[in-house]
Image (cartoon, helix red, strand yellow):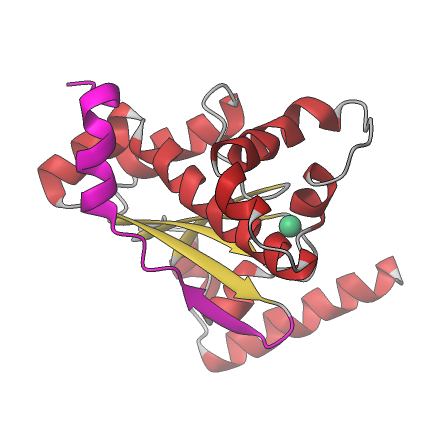
Amino acid sequence: MNIKQIFKNNENWVHSKLNHDADYFNNLSKGQNPDILYIGCSDSRVSAEELMGVAPGEVFIHRNIANMVPNTDLSAMSVIDYAVLHLKVNHVIICGHYYCGGVKAAMESKDLGILNPWLRNIRDVYRMHREELNSILDEDLRYNRLVELNVQEQCINLIKTAEVQRAFRDRGLTVHGWVFDIHSGKLIDLKINFSEILENVMEIYHLD
Ligand code: CO
């Protein structure tokens, strides 16, 4: 990768945006008002804006290894707090992807140093769904299913936060679980039943 080329690309991009709309950056600088918070994987192949076809200013984005929402992760928690409480987004998306290296690593027995505590969150998802996962004999299908179940569990982690519970009650905020299939380029809605899960877990996680 030629780093100098990136600056040339940027110049071309600025020119093409200004050709189209002379006030483009002027308007962008006035502030943001996104309706969506997207939490996805850092994987270089899963480019959030591009795969959704959205423009700058439309989606608030957080990415980490395997699209996790650990409740002690200050970065993820701050992003959720800011997006839900201050930007007042109405949709929160957890977007996983098939062929996720983080999920794959969590399925293997290997000491990965500082990654161990991070991947342990995915191992916990495996443990919670061990029966279903172990019944899938095809390893690729089991891997895909863990990607999906991980998305589902991260949606539940979102629902455990006071901000999301309150925003659901006050303005009907919705949590969505998606998977991006790198092999086909398609975005798949896991159709996670947000209100049903919410009702189900609120007995334990209800905060206000
Ligand atoms: Co990934």
User: 114 or 34, which lies in front?
Assistant: 114
Q: Is residue 145 above or below residue 169?
A: below
Number of numbered tags placed on the structure image: 0
Residue occupying the point 77% across, 68% down:
8
Residue 61: in sight, yes or no? Answer: no
* Residue 33, position as x, y percentages in the image: 31, 50
- What range is drawn magenta here? 183-208
Please state, as top left, top right, bottom left or bottom right, where the C terminus lies in the image: top left
Q: Is residue 178 above or below residue 204?
A: below
Q: Quadrant of residue 13?
A: bottom right
* Residue 130, position as x, y percentages in the image: 53, 38
Q: Residue lying at the far right in this picture: please name it.
A: 2
Q: Residue lying at the far bottom in this picture: please name it.
A: 20
User: 58 or 73, which lies in front?
Assistant: 73
Q: Residue lying at the far left in this picture: please name it.
A: 170
Residue occupying the point 35% across, 29% down:
81
Please state, as top left, top right, bottom left or bottom right, where the N terminus lies in the image: bottom right
Report whether 172 appears left or right of 58: left
Q: Is residue 180 above or below residue 184?
A: above
Report whether 53 appears left or right of 32: right
Does 139 lie within the magenta span? no
Does 195 lie within the magenta span? yes
Residue 164: in sight, yes or no? Answer: yes
Residue occupying the point 41% across, 45% down:
152
* Residue 159, position as x, y percentages in the image: 30, 34
Report whether 92 appears left or right of 62: left
Residue occupying the point 47% across, 69% down:
187
* Residue 22, position as x, y percentages in the image: 46, 73
